[in-house]
Image: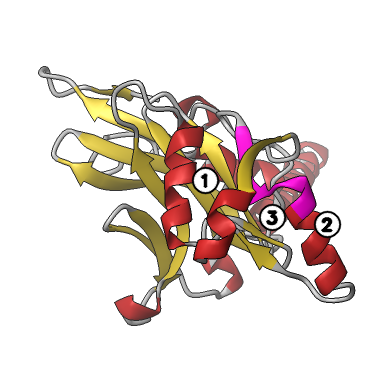
Amino acid sequence: MKLTTSLLMAGAALAFAACGAETDAKPETPAATSTAADACNPLPITGLCSNADPSIFLKTNPQAPKLAAKCEWRTQEISLTPTDAIVFRAQDCTAEGWVANVYEVVQGYVKYRMDGTPEDQAMFILEMLPLAAGETAEQAAMKSLGKAPEDQRERCETRLLAGPVLAGPAFELRPKPDFEAELNTLNPEDPWDACGPNGLSQDAAQYWEARPSYALFHMLGQDDAPWDPASFTFYRKSADGMWAKAG
């Protein structure tokens, strides 16, 4: 009887120790963190999951850099009209102690700022130009040359761009070869801009994207962006109240 009691007590002690060890490790366990991050919390406008599942978007860039170890991708949504929204994924780094970012649409631009920062200090990240019937994204981009210096407007063109990972074809509005050579000669050691604010900048990453109904101008600046440029997806609400991808 004593042997049986001792065995039971030893077994209980081992079980308690194992349970305690599991409890202590749980906050550090990647599986537990992943489960929490993957939870589907419906967003208020579209009802899409907040967990940034790739199926939510037309495309995502798997190589998009994480800003810090504890940052997590989250679904963002912004209403454009009562039946239209733009959806994308961006990193939530509040677990790192960083202030959350706020994303909003202002006069055809998607902008972002840190929560609590005045609206007039928000940064431009995407310009959305709706295409007219029969108009191409390249034609819409060329119209933006109206904001370029007058002597540059006839010396710029659109050119396909192979690098960026996007849902649609990428292209630049940039100097024609002779104009580019001239700029390189005039600025042998300094970066230069050309073709207006929607043109080429050697000091920042910015480029165009062609969509069926929009010309999108991406403004990423000089640093890694907290959002994924590949993920911008338009959604539309049908008569039955269901939201679906619209390009």
Query: From the image, which quarter does the C terminus lie in?
Result: top left
Q: Label 1: state its secondary structure.
A: helix
Residue 16 seen: no
- As drawn, which residue projects farthest toward the top? 240
Look at label 1 and name its amino acid. Ala
Does label 3 or label 1 sit earlier along the sequence? 1
- Specify the color scheme: secondary structure
Q: Amino acid at mark 2?
A: Ala
Q: Nearer the viewer, mark 3 or mark 1?
A: 3
123 drawn magenta: no
Question: Label 3, on which residue?
Answer: 66
Q: Is residue 123 left or right of residue 15?
A: left
Residue tagged 2: 181
Dot 3 or dot 2: first in sequence order is: 3
Q: In the rendered structure, find residue 36 and report the number of the disc placed on it.
A: 1
Q: Secondary structure at mark 3?
A: loop
Q: Nearer the viewer, mark 3 or mark 2?
A: 2
| Circles 3 and 1: CB atoms closer than 8 Å | no
Q: Residue visible at 58% across and 38% down?
A: 230
Report the magenta stretch's main SS. Answer: strand
In magenta stretch: residue 171: yes
Q: CA distance from mark 2 to mark 1?
A: 53 Å
Closer to the camera in the image, 117 or 194: 194
SS assignment at label 2? helix
Could you tell me residue 178's position as x and y percent?
A: 78, 51
